[in-house]
Amino acid sequence: MKKVRLSKYGIPDFYVEPLAETKYGLDFWDSAENGSWESDQLADLSSLARVGCYFIDIGASNGVYSLIMASLGCDVIAIEPDEAQFAAMKVNLNLNPDLKIESRKGLVVSSSGISLSPYALDIKSNDVKSLEKIDFTSLLKIDEMTIIKIDIEGGEWALLRDKRIVSHLRRHKNLRLSLSPHIGFFSKNYHKGVLYRLQFRLSVLRELLTLYFFSRKANSITYLGAKTSPGKLVRIDRILGGPGLRGHIIFEFKN
C-alpha cells in the first residue's frame, strides 16, 4: 500500500495499492506525485473542486481522478468498463472508505448506443455485451455544481454528436466538462493502402467538425489555461496545420 501525496495541488493524502495493477503500477503513482503526469489537467480539475460538488469520472481507469476529487470533497461516480482497471480501482477505493465514490463497471452510451474506437476497450479481454450500458443523461443533476471528466480513447465522439446530450448540458445550472480529445483514434489500418489513409483523413475531419459544433454550444472554452473560440480550437489540430491538440479542453455550461 502507498500513501499518495499531492499537497502541491492542495489535495489531501489518500491510499492506493500499486500491486493491484498490471497496466500502471508504482511508476504511475510516482509520476503523479512528482508532477510529470497530466499536471495541467490535474491542476485544473483540482482547482474546480468544491465540497459537495458532483464529479462524474467517465473513463476512471485506476480511480486516480476519482480519488483526487473525492479527497477534495466532491461526491463522485467513477465509471470504467475495463475488467482489470476496474478491479484495480475497486482495491484503491476500498483503501479510502471515507471518500464518497460510487463505482460502476460499464460503458457510457449515447442515444445511438455503443460507439468504441479500437483503442477504447480491449474486446479480447472484456465481454462488451455483459457491461452495463449507462445513459449519459441519466448521470446529470441539472441543479448541482457538476464537473465531468471524459477520457475514453476515441469513444467520445458519439457522445458529443448526440443532440439529446448537448441539450441536457445546455440546460445545466453550473457545469464544467473536461474533455481529452482523441482525434484519429479509430484506425489501425492507416498503412494498409491509399483508401485506408483517405478514410482516416475523412474521419479526422468529421471529428474536427464534431468538436467545432459541440464547442459552439458551450458558454466558454478553455484550452491550456487560455480562453479560446471554436474556430481557434479546431485549428490547433495538425491536419489543419496546427501543433496538435495535446491537452484537455474545459467547456463551461451555465444556464
Image (cartoon, rainbow, N blue to C red):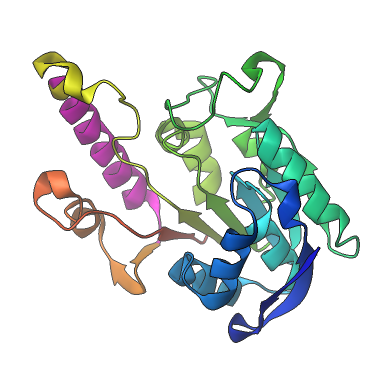
- Looking at the picture, tell me which residue is in the foreground, 255 or 14: 14
Quadrant of residue 126 in the image?
top right
Indicate whether residue 210 is drawn in magenta. Answer: yes
Q: In the rendered view, does 114 fall on the left or right side of 74? A: left
Q: Quadrant of the N terminus?
A: bottom right
**Main SS type for the magenta part?**
helix
Quadrant of residue 204 in the image?
top left
- In magenta, the rendered stretch is 198-219
- Looking at the picture, tell me which residue is in the foreground, 201 or 226: 201
Q: In the rendered view, does 251 fall on the left or right side of 190? A: right
- Looking at the picture, tell me which residue is in the foreground, 79 or 208: 79
Q: Tell me, yes or no, if residue 58 can be seen here.
A: yes
As drawn, 236 above or below 71: above
Q: Give the residue displayed 49% in from the left and 50% down from the top.
A: 170
Q: In the rendered view, does 254 fall on the left or right side of 195? A: right
Q: Tell me, yes or no, if residue 174 can be seen here.
A: no
